[in-house]
Image (cartoon, grey):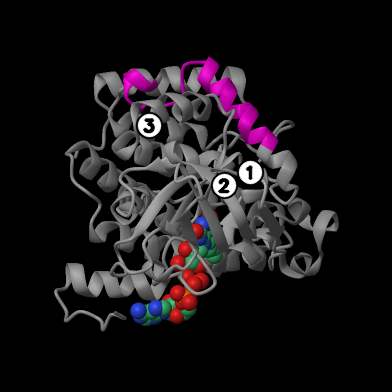
Amino acid sequence: MHFEDSPEEAELRAKARSWLEAHAPRRGEPGDFTTDTEHEQAFSDACRAWQRVLHDGGWAGLTWPVDHGGHGLSPAFEHIFQEEQMAFGVSTATLQVGLGMVAPTIVGHGTEAQKARFLPPMLRGEQSWCQLFSEPGAGSDLAGLSTAARRNATDDGWVVDGQKVWTSYSRFSDFGILLARTDPDAPKHHGISCIALDMSTPGIEVRPIRQLNGAAEFSEVFFTDVAVPDDCVIGPVDEGWRVAMTTLTNERGLVGNDWPGYAEMLVVARERGLDRDPVVRQRLVEQYTGEQLLRFFGYRMQTALSQGESFGPLASSVNLFFADHLRRSADLGLALLGAGALAAGDDAPGAGMWQFHFLTAPSVRIASGTDEIQRNSLGERALGLPREPRSP
Ligand SMILES: Cc1cc2nc3c(=O)[nH]c(=O)nc-3n(C[C@H](O)[C@H](O)[C@H](O)COP(=O)(O)OP(=O)(O)OC[C@H]3O[C@@H](n4cnc5c(N)ncnc54)[C@H](O)[C@@H]3O)c2cc1C
């Protein structure tokens, strides 16, 4: 791929930059809502409001099909917009399950009625989604899930019972994309259906889990006799595994950019008079190099997408590298603070941002496939090693 922008890309970048300057606060300036993600409701509301601003400004759904309210542009344009947006204190993180994972799933497998019902409000920031896949007994081995949907008495809908766990942003979600077993007698990867579940349906109980970093980003979700109409099944009944592969493939391409990095670290290093320390300088260079490598990984993924190819093993490499990079960057962030790293919350430098980063980074080694699973996948799919034993 070419690293320089084409004339059209350069034009979009310039437009995006000047539009963002006019509509968004810069990182760290008043109005920046990305440093306070612990206050989940306020953060979620701010993400919705920002998505609405993007929509009204003509910047939402850059790669979405024109028929569904998007602009039909190549992924490179979305990448450019995201690169420019990184300098600003705005985010759509709580909407990314919907925009980044559910939307392509509905475009690929949904009915026309489902596309019309779900896609436009998602784009306007009016509808947020969560991913109801993982269960206490089914994470890495997702197809082992046991949440069940059975036919209701009148045979014109489904009744769901079971439990999910780790469901990010479920407290603030209007809909969830749910995997449920609809045929208990079918082989493991069959007999599963994918359902668009209205989270306000009676019988759904969301119990937040407080995490190491103090936030309650994810929850357990319990279902007791939850009624689901037939028209909420996405794709064919019992063929939900195939549908879920589209969701998961799109999840693998999402590595967040709402993390403090080199630019913020340099400010702290200068404030603390550490920017001449050779060891600190070495670590800052490693941080900078890691960020550049992630940028180039991003370009490779965009290139694969624009050529109609799937990410393949590249997604596993990116996830592994990203998780490791965050761990090292979180260590450096705290090291730069010195004794200030021991303070908490508002008493801490940066209002606790560095401590939050440090306590959040380990979760990235688990989310969207653990490091071990990514390594298995690389071993099998990139290196051609013998397959891991699979449970039946
Ligand atoms: C921050 C965060 C957000 C998340 N958000 C969501 C969400 O919104 N929706 C959702 O559905 N899920 C979500 N998840 C769940 C995530 O997808 C699972 O945690 C992940 O797939 C691992 O599953 P598990 O936790 O059940 O661990 P397990 O699968 O039980 O694994 C336990 C340990 O065994 C190892 N292991 C398992 N199988 C193998 C194997 N074959 N070879 C080698 N080692 C193995 C794992 O690497 C791990 O170390 C989230 C997780 C996190 C951390």
User: Is residue 105 a member of the stretch shown in magenta?
Assistant: no
Q: Which residue is mark 1?
A: 201
Question: Residue 44, relative to residue 264: is it above or below?
Answer: above
User: Crowding at label 1, few (<14), some or many (≥20) Cα neighbours within 10 Å?
Assistant: some
Marks 3/2 in contact by CB < 8 Å: the verdict is no
State the separation of the CA atoms marked 1 and 3: 34 Å
What residue lies at 55% left-to-right and 69% top-to-bottom? Answer: 362
Q: Which residue is mark 2?
A: 227
Residue 188, disc: none
The one of 316 and 369 positioned closer to us in this rendering: 369
- Foreground tag (1 vs 2): 2
State the separation of the CA atoms marked 3 and 2: 38 Å
Query: How many numbered dots are placed on residues in this image?
Result: 3
Residue 311 percent across, percent down from the top left: 25, 52
Say whether disc 3 or disc 2 marks the residue closer to the N-terminus. 3
Identify residue type, mark 1: Thr
Circle 1 sits in a helix, a strand or a loop, which is it? loop
Identify residue type, mark 3: Glu
Q: Which residue is mark 3?
A: 78
Quadrant where the image shows the N terminus: top left
The one of 386 and 276 positioned closer to us in this rendering: 386
Q: Which residues are magenta?
A: 45-68
Circle 2 sits in a helix, a strand or a loop, which is it? strand
The one of 169 and 306 positioned closer to us in this rendering: 169
Marks 1/2 in contact by CB < 8 Å: the verdict is yes
What residue lies at 44% left-to-right and 67% top-to-bottom? Answer: 145
Identify residue type, mark 2: Ala
| Residue furthest to the bottom | 389
